[in-house]
């Protein structure tokens, strides 16, 4: 499963149909087939379950338009949204992030899955041999650790900068074929890089236009009487709220110049404010689309949007309070 268009049918073949049961009589009228008595198939079905992440190319598209069956070698049996199965023609439903797909996987599906970012596999009933990882030479397993150790030593010893060491390590990994260029391109999240690049541009504009300084002065004027801790609390809270709607990296790039301006207006060490941005940008507990791991449990767990709000908002509050108290003690 699924049957390819080039597959030749023979007498005795067993066909599985997925669709509206009300139309099954119509199918039998078109065929001269009869159902065989006894078990339909002795071989275990390769049934798998996957969730659609936020950055998936399937979001907003239909299974029919995306050619999911022929491209990924998998036939969708059911689509669940917020724990409720979608009815009608599955191939014509527009998919959303967090949707759960139940499908029968073909022989090539698990090969394609290693290079796919469109779906996240969460369960399967495929034979163990199908899921067996490719055999990797021992030197390819050890080499990355050696290269990483070399990078750390070169930077700590002062021989080179972190950026230069990282570029050199990447070149060594590519030249030695530990990772191929095609694998690198497959795993690059271009949409995330574009968002980060745009956030850097906005951050530079905020700093160059004087907006960061103006916001810093406004923060000091309104909460300066409460002390530096209040300023740190404001930055940490703003960062936590922003990261619920933007990626973590984009939030950090956007909030950093504001945090530096506030620290400058208070006349204090900016490290604590930089750490506040870093920690705040790593939050995002209150909405399901804040991070893809949320989406991995959102659909399969039958959660609702308000479930994340109920648990996530208190977590964000605890996170902010703990960060505000501990950051000045450490940095």
Image: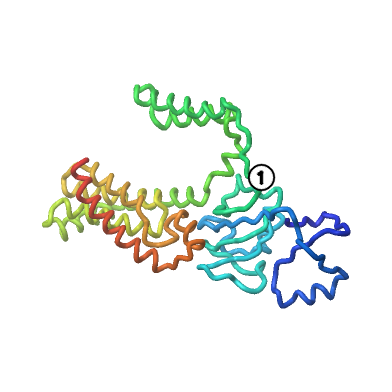
Up-down: is 135 above or below 62? above
Task: Confirm whether residue 48 shows in the render.
Answer: yes
Place of residue 204 in the rendered image (x, y in percent of width and height, measured from the top left): 35, 48
Q: Helix, strand or loop at disc 1?
A: helix
Residue beneath the point at 25% across and 47% down: 273
Badge 1, how many Cα within 10 Å: few under 14, some, many 20+?
Answer: few
Left of 241 or right of it: where is 79?
Answer: right
Q: Nearer the viewer, residue 303 or 240?
A: 303
Residue under the image location 31 percent in, 53 percent down: 209
Residue, far front: 38
Q: Coloured how?
A: rainbow
Question: Is 73 in front, or is 38?
Answer: 38
Left or right: 159 with respect to 91?
Answer: left
Using the image as rendered, state which of residue 325 and residue 3 is in the foreground: 3
Task: Say which residue appears at 84% left-offset and 69% top-offset.
Answer: 34
**Residue 67: x, y in percent?**
69, 59
Where residue 190 appears, x then y in whole percent?
53, 48
Asked where in the image residue 79 lies, by quadrant, the reply is bottom right
Q: Which quarter of the figure is the C terminus placed in? A: top left
In this rendering, the answer to whether 289 lies above or below 152 is below
Q: Say left or right for 149 vs 68.
A: left
Q: How many marks?
A: 1
The N terminus: image quadrant:
bottom right
The answer to whether residue 201 of the structure is visible from this angle is no
Residue at far left of view: 225
User: Would you name the residue on which mark 1 appears?
Assistant: 130
Q: Position of residue 65 (x, y in %)?
A: 67, 63
């Amino acid at each position: 499963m699924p049957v390819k268009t080039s597959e030749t049918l023979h007498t005795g073949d067993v066909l599985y149909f997925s669709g509206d049961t009300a139309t099954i009589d119509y199918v039998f009228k078109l065929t001269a087939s009869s159902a065989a008595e006894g078990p339909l198939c002795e071989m275990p079905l390769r049934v798998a379950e996957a969730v659609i992440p936020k950055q998936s190319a399937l979001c907003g598209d239909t299974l029919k338009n995306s050619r999911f069956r022929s491209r990924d070698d998998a036939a969708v049996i059911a689509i669940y949204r917020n724990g409720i199965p979608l009815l009608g023609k599955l191939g014509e439903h527009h998919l959303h992030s967090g949707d759960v797909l139940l499908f029968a996987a073909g022989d090539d599906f698990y090969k394609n899955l290693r290079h796919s970012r469109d779906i996240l596999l969460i369960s399967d009933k495929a034979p163990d041999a199908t899921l067996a990882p490719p055999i990797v030479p021992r030197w390819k397993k050890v080499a990355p650790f050696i290269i990483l150790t070399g990078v750390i030593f070169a930077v700590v010893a002062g021989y080179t900068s972190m950026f230069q060491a990282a570029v050199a390590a990447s070149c060594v990994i590519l030249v030695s074929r530990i990772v191929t260029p095609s694998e690198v391109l497959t795993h690059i999240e271009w949409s995330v890089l574009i968002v980060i690049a745009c956030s850097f541009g906005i951050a530079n504009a905020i700093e160059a236009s004087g907006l960061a300084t103006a916001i810093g002065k406004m923060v000091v004027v309104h909460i300066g009487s409460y002390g530096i801790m209040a300023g740190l609390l404001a930055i940490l809270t703003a960062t936590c709220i922003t990261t619920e709607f933007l990626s973590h990296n984009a939030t950090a790039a956007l909030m950093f110049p504001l945090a530096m301006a506030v620290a400058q207006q208070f006349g204090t060490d900016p490290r604590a404010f930089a750490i506040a941005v870093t920690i705040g940008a790593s939050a995002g507990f209150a909405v399901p689309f804040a991070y893809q791991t949320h989406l991995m449990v959102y659909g399969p767990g039958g959660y609702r949007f308000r479930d994340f709000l109920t648990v996530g908002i208190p977590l964000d509050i605890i996170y902010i309070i703990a960060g505000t108290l501990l950051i000045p003690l450490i940095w």
